[in-house]
Image (tube, grey):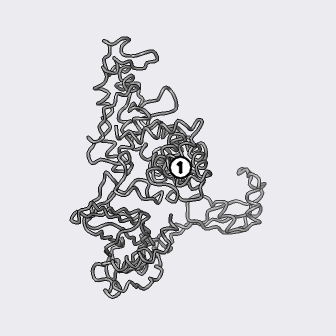
Amino acid sequence: MANRRLASRFFLALTAVANLLVSFGAMPASNLNSGLVAEPNPPPGPDRYSIVAIEYTAYDWDLARWKDRAEVCSIIVEHEGVPTLDEVYNHCGTIIYREWVSQPMCNLNRTATCEGYYLKLVGTEKKEKEIAMQLPAAHAWISLEDCEPVYSASTNICESKPTLVITGKEPLPNESIIRIEGKYDDASFFCEDTDTCKFQIPETDDDGVTVEFWAYSSYGDSSEIYEAQVRVQKADEGDPDQLYWYVDVLSSQWFGGVSATCAEAWDVFPPVGGTPKWLSTPTQSETLSSDIPYTYLAANLILQGAVDASSCPDGGLAPGNTVNQCGLEASRETVRQWQNQFDDLILSTAKETSVPAFLLKNLFARESQFWPGIFQAAGDIGLGQLTENGADTALFWNRSFFNQFCPLVVDSETCGAGYANLDEEQQAELRRALVNSVDATCEDCPLGLDLTQADFSIGVFAHTLIANCEQAGQVIYNYTGKSPAEVAAYEDLWKFTLVNYNAGGGCLAEAVSGAYASNELPLTWDTVSPHLIGVCSNAVDYVNDISRQADK
């Protein structure tokens, strides 16, 4: 899709330039009206360092021969303790280094018989040296003016023609942003002597247009070149007095409210007008409320004594500890209260992570019916039934989550290597720790559950879903050779993500490759799901149930 977006749209480019209304009088009107703006020079990018003088202690060591106590080389290091092997090699050369590392141990009570060399500290000295320190770079953000974000739909509504705003930020106290430059659908623009650039943007096609932008600093350098995909669609209700525009922006520098979850990772816009209900987040937690007679939840509440079903046949339970009809009726109110007790936290987690609240609730309903323990003594644990394989996906594909979680288990220095670079034992330790973190089972707690642990797990499952959307995108690329945006729409990509979460990347890969080999493009849920066969087939009902749950 990136290539299509970058392809020349000559007519649209001229229209875009003609409509650029830059604030602060930064661009001459003649340039605007002509539609011809000089091609900007490539920005230099961040290039800022400060020379800092630091004090240190130099340790002067001599490497001497045992035979005659003669010095063979001097080694000066900047740390306590004996020089390292690398330092011996660098200061004394290859021959002495080889003799040093291969010499026999010396009996310090009989040094006259020792062979090879020994180290002795000659002295220390306070010194000063200059080092180059990288300073924080300028950056730029993109937003909209006078438009209202619609949180529940992950889009923006503008009641007047949309105005795009690019704002430069300079972190150094004595410097400032002096110019904004960029390209709107290959048409260049600039705003001089200001840190903000504003211009109205015209309606686009469904793919949107590419915007590149950067900021120049008085320091003499610039920010990085940033990119955004911008889509503007007019919502025409037939009344000329009721015109408004849907505007969606995909960019790491977006600073204008919520964006559709995983849209940037896939480089794909959500449906015009916002996401469907099951991929949305309401403004109030009460909207998430449900009243579904979950049988597994009812049975657990009866077993743990939260519901008194003693008046029912067999205490409300059928053989195998499944709930009977009388037990289901007796537990109805408690089941209703229980399934809604997490709604506030689901909503706040959705706002923090951008993972849709309805999706989270629907997933918990399908996976555990909101009972946050271990499912039938299997390895599926918590509200979202996390396994070690699921933990592996979360830690590998969601780097920011790994950076938050890893230091809780092992030391920060080890975490710095990244999950993929840890040894197998360390990875296994992290996986087990993550699975245990979502297990609310507690023998000494009321009902056998630690609900504080269940609350914590909601955020873990949100980050795990983000990891799965990243992996699903990579699977599609690996088996089609195309970006997700080139072959699938936003809602279908989320359904593929749920396949990845439930059945694994192998099942998703088999289904995608099967549909792609049959030339069934674009990849939709209807074309991909028939290729989920064998052990993968259960994912079909799983995805259908979660994506329809919000309508119940």
Can you give x and y, in whole percent of width and height, for residue 261 in the image? 41, 53
Identified by mark 1, the residue type is Phe
Q: In the visual, does 445 lie left or right of 403?
A: left
Q: In the visual, does 218 lie left or right of 419?
A: left
Can you give x and y, in whole percent of width and height, for residue 462 in the image? 41, 45
Can you give x and y, in whole percent of width and height, for residue 73 in the image? 69, 69
The answer, for residue 50, to whether it is visible in the render is: no
- Image quadrant where residue 313 sits: top left
Secondary structure beneath disc 1?
A: helix
Can you give x and y, in whole percent of width and height, for residue 15 in the image? 37, 77
Q: Nearer the viewer, residue 366 or 219?
A: 366
Q: Nearer the viewer, residue 191 or 416?
A: 191
- Eyeballing the image, is 106 above or below 373? below
- Eyeballing the image, is 241 above or below 423? below
Residue at the limit of the structure toward the left, as seen here: 241
Q: In the visual, does 192 lie left or right of 404?
A: left
Residue at the limit of the structure toward the front, as seen here: 238
- Image quadrant where residue 444 sits: top left
Q: Nearer the viewer, residue 182 or 180?
A: 182
Residue at 59% across / 42% down in the picture? 425
Residue at 59% across / 65% down in the picture? 77
Q: In the visual, does 337 lie left or right of 249?
A: left
> How would you rate the neighbour count of disc 1 (Cα within 10 Å): few for under 14, some for 14-19, many for 20 or more?
some
How many badges with numbers are in the image?
1
Q: Nearer the viewer, residue 237 or 304?
A: 237
The answer, for residue 253, to whether it is visible in the render is: yes
Residue at which label 1 appears: 396
Q: Quadrant of the C terminus?
A: top left
- Eyeballing the image, is 132 above or below 364? below
